[in-house]
Image (cartoon, grey):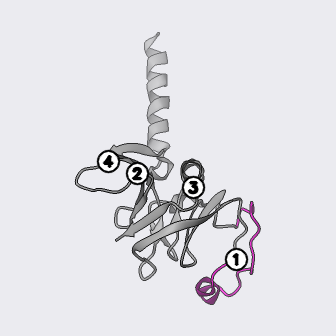
């Protein structure tokens, strides 16, 4: 390999690394220390803006997420009560109050639909763990309380967990 080819290859790889963002991160297996959750549990750590799928007593899959903005955050334990691919979305009353011009229903698959490619609804409220059509919002304090994931990540998580999965949200 010539020096010119090596330099061009290094520049191409370097540019690719620099152009990737944290929101493009893939789920990663991580170790857990000092925390005990049952395998299969989803734990959302709001302050970290991370979702963990507990695999066993020492390991979890970690995903970047967008969480509730100031005044819209919550904590507690719930369960996944529904799973939907390309869901239509009806804005909750609070969203409609803040954005009255928003349509009553946004069809699934629409680029304006904030649910992305999949959603898993949470029991006891109007919240869901869902994808997004705005990938740059993942990693921020951005929602009305839902947990927002990259479409590739919600697709991965959707395949890993059933309805009835326990979800623990911490601040």
Mark nearest the camera among 1 and 2 is 2
Residue 18 disc label: none
Q: Position of residue 1 (x, y in %)?
A: 47, 9
- The reply to whether discs 2 and 4 touch (Cβ–Cβ < 8 Å) is yes
Give, as a single range, the part of the protein colored magenta.
91-112
Ranked by sequence position, the earlier of labels 1 and 2 is 2
Q: Describe residue 114's horizontal placement relative to residue 27 as left or right.
A: right
Q: Position of residue 30 (x, y in %)?
A: 35, 44
Query: Mark 4 or mark 3, which is nearer the start of the sequence?
Result: 4
Image quadrant where one finds the C terminus: bottom left
Whether residue 21 is in magenta: the answer is no
At x 50% / y 75%, what residue is drawn? Answer: 145
**Which residue in the protein does label 1 denote?**
90
> From the viewer's perspective, is residue 81 above or below residue 53?
below
Callout 1: SS: loop
**Which residue is found at the position 35% from the left and 61% from the top?**
48
Spatial distance from mark 3 to mark 2, Cα to Cα? 13 Å
Q: Nearer the viewer, mark 1 or mark 3?
A: 3
| Labels 4 and 1: the sequence-earlier one | 4
The residue at which mark 3 appears reads as 162
Could you tell me how far apart the alpha carbons at marks 1 and 3 are, in whole angstroms?
A: 24 Å
15 up-or-down from 49: above or below: above
Crowding at label 3, few (<14), some or many (≥20) Cα neighbours within 10 Å? some
| Mark closest to the chain's N terminus, 3 or 2 | 2
Q: Is residue 145 above or below residue 6?
A: below
Report, in whole angstroms, how far the alpha carbon at label 2 lies from the one at label 4: 7 Å
Tags 1 and 2 in contact by the CB under 8 Å rule?
no
- Mark 4 or 1, closer to the camera: 4
**Residue bearing mark 4:** 57
């Amino acid at each position: 390999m010539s020096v010119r080819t090596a330099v061009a290859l290094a520049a191409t790889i370097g540019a690719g690394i620099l152009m990737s963002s944290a929101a493009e991160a893939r789920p990663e297996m991580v170790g857990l220390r000092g925390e005990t959750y049952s395998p299969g549990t989803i734990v959302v750590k709001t302050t970290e803006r991370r979702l963990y799928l507990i695999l066993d007593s020492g390991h979890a899959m970690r995903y970047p997420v967008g969480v509730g903005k100031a005044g819209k955050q919550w904590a507690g334990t719930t369960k996944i009560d529904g799973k939907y691919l390309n869901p239509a979305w009806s804005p909750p009353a609070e969203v409609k109050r803040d954005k009255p011009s928003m349509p009553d229903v946004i069809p699934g698959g629409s680029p304006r639909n904030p649910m992305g490619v999949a959603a898993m609804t949470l029991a006891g409220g109007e919240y869901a763990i869902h994808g997004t059509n705005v990938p740059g919002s993942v990693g921020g304090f951005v929602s009305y309380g839902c947990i927002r994931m990259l479409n590739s990540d919600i697709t991965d998580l959707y395949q890993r967990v059933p309805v009835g999965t326990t979800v623990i949200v911490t601040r």
